[in-house]
Amino acid sequence: MDRLRQELDGLMRYIQRVRQEIAAIDRPTDGDDRFESMGEQLEAVVAATGAATNTIMEAMESNEQLLDALRETITDPAQIAALDRLTANGNAVFEACAFQDITGQRVNKVVKSVTYVEERVNALVDIWGRDKLAEIEIAAEPEKSADEDLLHGPQLDGQGLSQDDIDKLFD
């Protein structure tokens, strides 16, 4: 009977530990919802790489038009060969820009995985009861250094300073 009591006691401690971990996920002490932040940050990566890729491709298309216009005015074989090399380099850039589509697909897979985990955690929160979890004391996040507290990396659109705002500080 003592062995059964010990096993039940161990199981109860384990369940309490699980509840504490779920409570910590549900209400982080630093106020940063990591699940939400992960998804938003990954979506921002896809948007930023997409915008950069579009800018690159538009510039390359413009260069291609300029090369075509030059080609019509040039008869020197060496200069034509140079234009051909420039065109080939431009085509290589176009092909390399395919990374954005593949990267976007992979990041979207990660976002789906994060969302899946978040849904499972929310289901556990519902099972345990949000009110009951709110009563559980959770350990505070470790103190951040002064630098860590200031550095938050690139901000999502509409949050913090934009890169343009930062660039203006150096003008």
Image: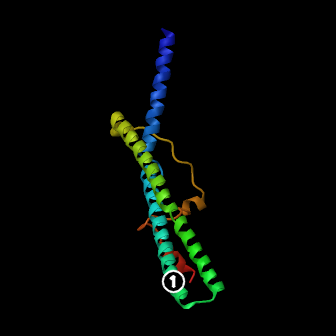
Q: What secondary structure is found at the residue carrying circle 1?
A: helix
Q: Position of residue 101 (x, y in %)?
A: 47, 60
Instruction: Say which amino acid is labelled 1.
Output: Asp
Q: Quadrant of the C terminus?
A: bottom right
Residue under circle 1?
A: 68
Task: Tell me the residue at 49%/62% (across/down).
Answer: 100
Q: Within the image, what quadrant is residue 151 found in? A: bottom right
Task: Tell me the residue at 51%/83% (across/down).
Answer: 68
Front residue of this view, candidates 95 and 97 = 95
Q: Position of residue 58 (x, y in %)?
A: 47, 76
Task: Tell me the residue at 44%/43% (across/down).
Answer: 25
Q: Position of residue 23 (x, y in %)?
A: 42, 40
Establish if 72 lies above or below 53. below
Front residue of this view, candidates 79 and 155 = 79
Front residue of this view, candidates 15 and 45 = 45
Horizontal side of 146 relative to 159 (left or right) equals: right
Q: Position of residue 53 (x, y in %)?
A: 49, 68
Front residue of this view, candidates 16 and 137 = 16
Q: Callout 1: few (<14), some (14-19), or many (20+) C-alpha neighbours within 10 Å? A: few
